[in-house]
Amino acid sequence: MCNGCVQKEYPDRGNTCLENGSYLMNYLGCVNCHQRDFVLISNKAMEDEDGEEIVTYDHVCKNCDHVIARHEYTFSVVDEYQEYTMLCMLCGKAEDSISVLPDDPRQSAPLF
């Protein structure tokens, strides 16, 4: 992974978790070949461990195959919530939780 290719390492992305793609707003350009071109995805792998889906891949320079960052995305269902996380030097860090119920109990107003 290369901190010279990104503006900010692991920027806070709030609840924006990317299962695929690249956050190009944070990409300065390849420190190896000095080009700012498309970022390719390589070595994509999907695992399912104990009900948790894990997607990993490398962000790679289109011109010289320099590895810019390693991306990890996870998805799981915990109790009645879908849990998402993302950790990547280029795309940032984020987590989100969404209720599987039609009405999220955390969003309902208290009765008293």
Image: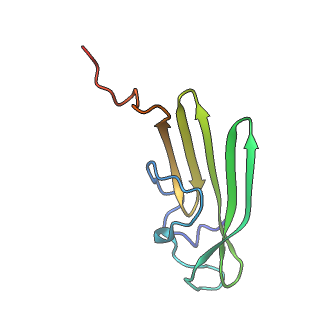
Residue 79 image position (x, y, % from top left): 57, 26
Q: Residue at x 45, y 48 (%)?
A: 15
Residue 107 image position (x, y, % from top left): 35, 31
Residue 63 image position (x, y, % from top left): 67, 85
Q: Nearer the viewer, residue 11 or 23?
A: 23
Q: Residue at x 55, y 67 (%)?
A: 22
Q: Nearer the viewer, residue 2 or 39?
A: 39
Q: Is residue 65 left or right of residue 9?
A: right
* Furthest-top residue in this view: 112
Q: Nearer the viewer, residue 8 or 67?
A: 67
Please tell me whether residue 34 is drawn above or below residue 19 in the rendered image: below
Rendered-image quadrant of the C terminus: top left
Quadrant in which residue 30 is drawn: bottom right
Q: Total label count?
A: 0
Q: How is the image coloured?
A: rainbow
Rendered-image quadrant of the N terminus: bottom right
* Furthest-front residue in this view: 102
Please tell me whether residue 111 is drawn above or below residue 40 in the rendered image: above
Residue 3 image position (x, y, % from top left): 59, 67
Q: Is residue 106 left or right of residue 4?
A: left
